Image: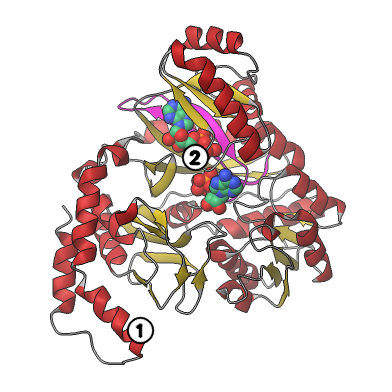
């Protein structure tokens, strides 16, 4: 086992992922530090840090200010910086600046971020490693004539994508030649505004598709392993809501094959750290096409931890240490455990008001626990959900010996997630995973949109009749320590279960 060289770690993030990273770093005996915006002074990860500093300035911007972050890390004596996900995690200039400041970036090299984090470059790397990519063009498109020629070649519908896009943004489906020119111009200007990078490219739009991704680890010396797949086709507006493993869509043979190719791609560039290769699987087939790589820890990495027993943050820190010491380490032996794992992302949006963001102070934040349940969260009574940041409050995960058991546990866990007065997607997600379309495993990336009306209704029924939540809110407000009213629990639960 590699000796951990890094003793002092700075976490350049907030919320659940900062807490997640702090826990592992402490377990490994590290000194942990972090810096927080003026809106974040109460966040729980700060309690686990040995040293903290406030980041002066606009709370909406400070976590993106590489200069301020690096300065804080240096002043707090850090040897390495873990970027978490979002913010600066996939920013090659940040990674380079961290190294230039004499610290280690826990993640890939700046060159690898460019070569794999950019969707156009990544297509080329995949092609070179023999990984199938979505039919299309691997060069940015600047003029309408080129766009037309490509679209005619691959056939409509096509997808115009921002090379630097992310978070489900920067994509435009084009159904016919008549729409192409206008769509191209819009996509370019949107990409410029949103990602500071106007480059777009065109690939085939696979109308009915599943999203399957492979978690990989690379040691930075040319060795890489696959940690198996995650199925992420339950999406709303291209954003993942539910992730599970194993994928109900793939045979074990196909899953193994994709895993081997993903590891081969990572090894081919001497990838350093944890990363995820994302693939599109046309519905009802065992075909697969690479779409992009995320060169960081993924929101849904706990699904893989539950299926392998590994701690991915620990693996990241071991790889980082080995690279500091310039000595290759042994990547972990990966054994797929005989469990099914599912994650639900509970976010601060109101499903009854078209998913409008919901902000404000939390009076109540009761999170589930129990056999087969894991919760990665930052939400606590007294803290505030601010409008500046990602709306993720909690990731609720369930494992089971069977998929059915995991779903059953997750429904109950989501029903035991009482957060108020901020509205959350927990009731919506509980209703969603009880739908036949999800239970059967026969879903695709369009399933959530098709279930819109049905889900709207179940969620409203549940919220309106939740006597449990009403009673709990009252207790939170009044500080009353009595029992919930008799029957409240039973009434509440039967209402949730009507969601079918
Ligand atoms: P994942 O599969 O890990 O969820 P996403 O691409 O959906 O990958 O986004 C991961 C995280 O990146 C989000 O939770 C958020 O913190 C951050 N993020 C998402 N979209 C953007 C964006 N457009 N700009 C910056 N950060 C983003
Ligand atoms: P992002 O960086 O925003 O995560 P992705 O390339 O991963 O961008 O695409 C996000 C989602 O959009 C995918 O999970 C999938 O649902 C859908 N998508 C992406 N590419 C295609 C495609 N070629 N055909 C159909 N759907 C796609
Ligand atoms: Mg993606």
- Residue 134 position, x and y percent, is 50, 22
Q: Is residue 73 visible?
A: yes
Q: Secondary structure at mark 1?
A: helix
Read off the residue under disc 2. 168
Q: Residues in magenta?
A: 269-297
The residue closer to the viewer here, 272 or 458, is 458
Q: Quadrant of residue 484?
A: bottom left
- Residue 46 position, x and y percent, is 63, 75
Mark 2 within 8 Å of ligand 2, using the beta carbon: yes
- Residue 462 position, x and y percent, is 21, 62
Residue 185 appears left or right of 168 = right
| Mark 1 / mark 2, whichever is N-terminal | 2
Can you tell which mark lies on residue 476?
A: 1
Q: Residues within 10 Å of mark 2 (few under 14, many from 20)?
A: few
Image point 67% across, 57% down: which residue?
Answer: 61
Residue 106 appears left or right of 304 = right
């Amino acid at each position: 086992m590699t000796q951990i060289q890094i003793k002092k770690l700075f976490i350049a993030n907030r919320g659940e992922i900062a807490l997640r990273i702090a826990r592992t770093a402490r377990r490994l005996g590290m000194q942990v530090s972090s810096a927080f915006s003026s809106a974040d002074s109460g966040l729980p990860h700060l309690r686990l840090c040995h040293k903290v500093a406030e980041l002066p300035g606009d709370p909406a911007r400070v976590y993106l200010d590489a200069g301020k972050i690096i300065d804080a890390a240096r002043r707090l004596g850090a040897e390495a910086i873990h970027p978490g996900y979002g913010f600066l995690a996939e920013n090659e200039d940040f990674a380079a600046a961290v190294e230039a400041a004499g610290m280690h970036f826990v993640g890939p090299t700046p060159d690898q971020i460019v070569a794999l984090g950019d969707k156009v470059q990544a297509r080329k790397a995949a092609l070179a490693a023999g990984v199938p990519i979505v039919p299309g063009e691997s060069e940015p498109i600047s003029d309408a004539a080129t766009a037309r020629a490509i679209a005619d070649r691959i056939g409509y519908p096509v997808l115009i994508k921002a090379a630097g896009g992310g978070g489900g943004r920067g994509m435009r489906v084009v159904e016919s030649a008549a729409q192409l020119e206008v769509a191209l111009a819009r996509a370019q200007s949107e990409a410029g505004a949103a990602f500071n990078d106007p480059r777009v490219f065109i690939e085939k739009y696979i109308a009915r598709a599943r999203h399957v991704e492979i978690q990989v680890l690379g040691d930075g010396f040319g060795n890489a392993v696959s940690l198996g797949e995650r199925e992420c086709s339950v999406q709303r507006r291209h954003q993942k809501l539910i992730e599970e493993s194993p994928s109900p869509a793939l045979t074990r043979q196909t899953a193994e094959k994709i895993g081997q190719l993903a590891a081969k791609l990572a090894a081919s560039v001497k990838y350093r750290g944890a990363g995820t290769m994302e693939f599109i699987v046309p519905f009802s087939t065992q075909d697969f096409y690479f779409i992009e790589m995320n060169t960081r820890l993924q929101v849904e990495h706990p699904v893989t931890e539950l299926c392998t027993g590994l701690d991915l943050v620990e693996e990241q820190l071991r790889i980082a240490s080995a690279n500091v010491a310039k000595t290759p380490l042994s990547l972990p032996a990966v054994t797929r455990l005989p469990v099914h794992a599912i994650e639900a992302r509970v976010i601060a949006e109101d499903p009854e008001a078209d998913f409008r963001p919901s902000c404000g102070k939390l009076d109540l934040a009761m999170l589930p626990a129990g056999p087969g349940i894991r919760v990665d969260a930052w939400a606590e009574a007294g803290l505030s959900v601010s409008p500046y940041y990602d709306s993720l409050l909690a990731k609720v995960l369930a494992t089971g010996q069977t998929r059915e058991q995991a779903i059953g546990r997750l429904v109950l866990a989501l029903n035991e997630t009482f957060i108020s007065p901020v509205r959350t997607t927990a009731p919506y997600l509980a209703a969603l995973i009880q739908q036949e379309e999800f239970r059967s495993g026969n879903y695709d990336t369009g399933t959530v949109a098709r279930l819109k009306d049905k889900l709207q209704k179940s969620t409203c029924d549940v919220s309106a009749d939740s006597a449990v939540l009403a009673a709990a809110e009252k207790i939170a407000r009044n500080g009353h320590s009595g029992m919930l009213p008799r029957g409240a629990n039973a009434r509440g639960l039967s209402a949730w279960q009507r969601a079918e």
